[in-house]
Amino acid sequence: MDFNSVLFLISGVVVGIVAAFSGLGGGIIIVPLLLFMGFSAQKAVGTSFLAILIIAVSALFAHHKLANLDVKTGLLIGIGGIVGAQIGAYLVEHASTEIFKKIFALLLFGIAAYIFLKKES
């Protein structure tokens, strides 16, 4: 097994823990890792979704056992997400990797700032 394969497996463990713990999905970790390893934005996003699908199914079963699901809400968001995913895939296909990196970084920064500054009620 080569170094990249080991790195991907270790990354998968970390992503699985973060995704199941926080619900953030793995893209926040997987996409930057793949970009760092030289993947194009399009290939990084597509590959990330395959990994996230596998991780999400596993996390879904774990959270189902713990009774941490609101099935109706999850299905409604998922149905809306089908439409959004088609639009997002089209948009990333037409963006350069450099532009994608900038947009992705701004998105991550915005989410981090919101979480950091949000006051609990």
Image (cartoon, helix red, strand yellow):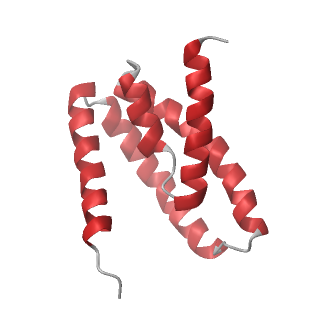
Q: Is residue 92 above or below residue 4?
A: below
The percent position of residue 62, horizontal first and vertical second, equals 74, 60
Q: Is residue 111 left or right of residue 39?
A: left
Q: Which residue appears farthest toward the bottom when viewing the image?
A: 121
> In front here: 98 or 2?
2
- Dividing the picture into quadrants, the one containing residue 110 is bottom left
Q: Is residue 55 above or below residue 9?
A: below
Q: Which residue appears farthest toward the right when viewing the image?
A: 65
The percent position of residue 104, horizontal first and vertical second, equals 29, 42
**Number of numbered tags placed on the structure image:** 0
Image quarter where the N terminus lies is: top right
Q: Residue at x 63, y 29 (%)?
A: 9
Q: Residue at x 66, y 42 (%)?
A: 54
> In front here: 90 or 14?
14
Q: Residue at x 42, y 52 (%)?
A: 84
Q: Which residue appears farthest toward the top when viewing the image?
A: 2
Image quarter where the C terminus lies is: bottom left
Q: Is residue 104 left or right of residue 78?
A: left
The percent position of residue 5, horizontal first and vertical second, equals 61, 19
Q: Is residue 99 left or right of residue 85?
A: left
Q: Residue at x 48, y 32 (%)?
A: 46
- Dividing the picture into quadrants, the one containing residue 13 is top right
> In front here: 78 or 103?
103
Q: Is residue 16 above or below residue 119?
A: above
The percent position of residue 42, horizontal first and vertical second, equals 39, 28
